[in-house]
Image: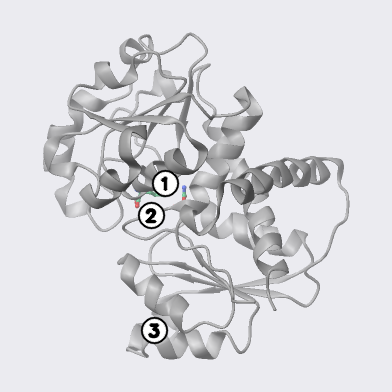
Amino acid sequence: MATRHFLTLTDLDRGEVETLIRRACELKQDFRTGKVYEPFKGKTLAMIFEKSSTRTRVSFESAMTQLGGHAIFMSPRDTQLGRGEPLEDSARVLSKMVDCIMIRTFEHEKLIRFAACSEVPVINGLTDSYHPCQLLADMQTYYEFRGSITGRKVAWLGDGNNMCHSYIDAAGLLDFSLRIACPEPYLPDPELLRSAGDRVELFRNPEDAIVDADLVVTDVWASMGQEQESIERNRVFRPYQVNQQLLALATPEVIFMHCLPAHRGEEVTAEVIDGPRSVVWEEAGNRLHSQKALLEFLLGQRN
Ligand code: CP
Ligand code: NVA
């Protein structure tokens, strides 16, 4: 059987995503009751971070520890990756030594090249184009708070970035309506939008996108690697800030998510992110459980 990778959400089919969500909920329950479950004894996950991380690093590392395995943190600063060893060579070498590899990098194409040379499953820990691990946690969180997301309305306000792209994938897989409000120069990838069909709609006006939404999501206006564009982005995105006035247009049961880290006073007000509609802490915590389910799935798939 071919090695399964997780480079975008669409590497899984709908049934697999739903199974992972249910499994993540079970693993969360086991974690809470202190059940010892160590299927990964002797297994190692290598984690390559070319960008900063708090949640992704700690959730994967803790997941491996709790499941009886081990995780190795690698950064370009102190590995040969930073001294120009080709990515493909690193993939070939690492996959002779570890059971799974997670990478956070810039160009998505680098991840694809890496995975093509890896004999073990490769997980996308975020690229400039996608952040599928976050979507597993977000979909688990929606399921826990509100049940099935199928047929629901999700409003995405702000940048058409990596998170937005993974939401587009999720809308297609889980069949919900995604309403994106985004300023013209920052629209999501047109190819991805075309393939999503009528499940995804674009709005110039945030009010129009958020009306009757069951879930409202946003993200930073300047992602990692775009810091030098912050001043211009803060100006252009200002009308897309998720605040109490906008949120009042959504359904009364709306919940708010943000992958974090958040900038209060920019893409979201403190009143919203720290308010009763926000589920961001549960969402962040679910990175641990959904990634345990993912690791179990990918390692189980190995031949
Ligand atoms: N949401 C997320 O991926 O957070 P980190 O950048 O801290 O990993
Ligand atoms: N869009 C953000 C997500 C961080 C988890 C970034 O790429 O920096």
Q: Which mark is residue 128?
A: none
Above or below: residue 25 compared with residue 5: above
Can residue 260 be seen here? The reply is: no
- Residue 290 is situated, as x and y percent measured from the top left of the image, at 63, 49
Could you tell me which secondary element the residue under label 2 belongs to?
loop
Crowding at mark 2 (Cα within 10 Å: few <14, some 14-19, many 20+): many
Q: Which mark is residue 130?
A: 2
55 vs 13, nearest the viewer:
13
- Nearer to us of marks 2 and 1 is 1
- Residue 109 is situated, as x and y percent measured from the top left of the image, at 32, 70
Q: In this image, 151 relative to 210: left or right? A: right
- Residue 113 is situated, as x and y percent measured from the top left of the image, at 38, 78
272 vs 143, nearest the viewer:
143
Above or below: residue 131 compared with residue 71: above
In the rendered view of the protein, which quadrant contains the C terminus? bottom right
- Residue 48 is situated, as x and y percent measured from the top left of the image, at 48, 72
Q: Which mark is residue 87?
A: 3
- Nearer to us of marks 1 and 3 is 1
* Res 73 quadrant in image: bottom right
The answer to which of marks 1 and 3 sits earlier in the sequence is 3
Amino acid at dot 1? Asp
* Residue at mark 1: 169
Whole-angstrom CA distance, mark 1 to mark 3, is 27 Å
Which residue is found at the position 82% from the left and 66% from the top? 39
Asked if marks 2 and 1 touch (Cβ < 8 Å), the reply is yes
Could you tell me which secondary element the residue under label 1 belongs to?
helix
Could you tell me which secondary element the residue under label 3 belongs to?
helix
The answer to which of marks 2 and 1 sits earlier in the sequence is 2
Q: In this image, 89 relative to 193: left or right? A: right
Amino acid at dot 3? Leu
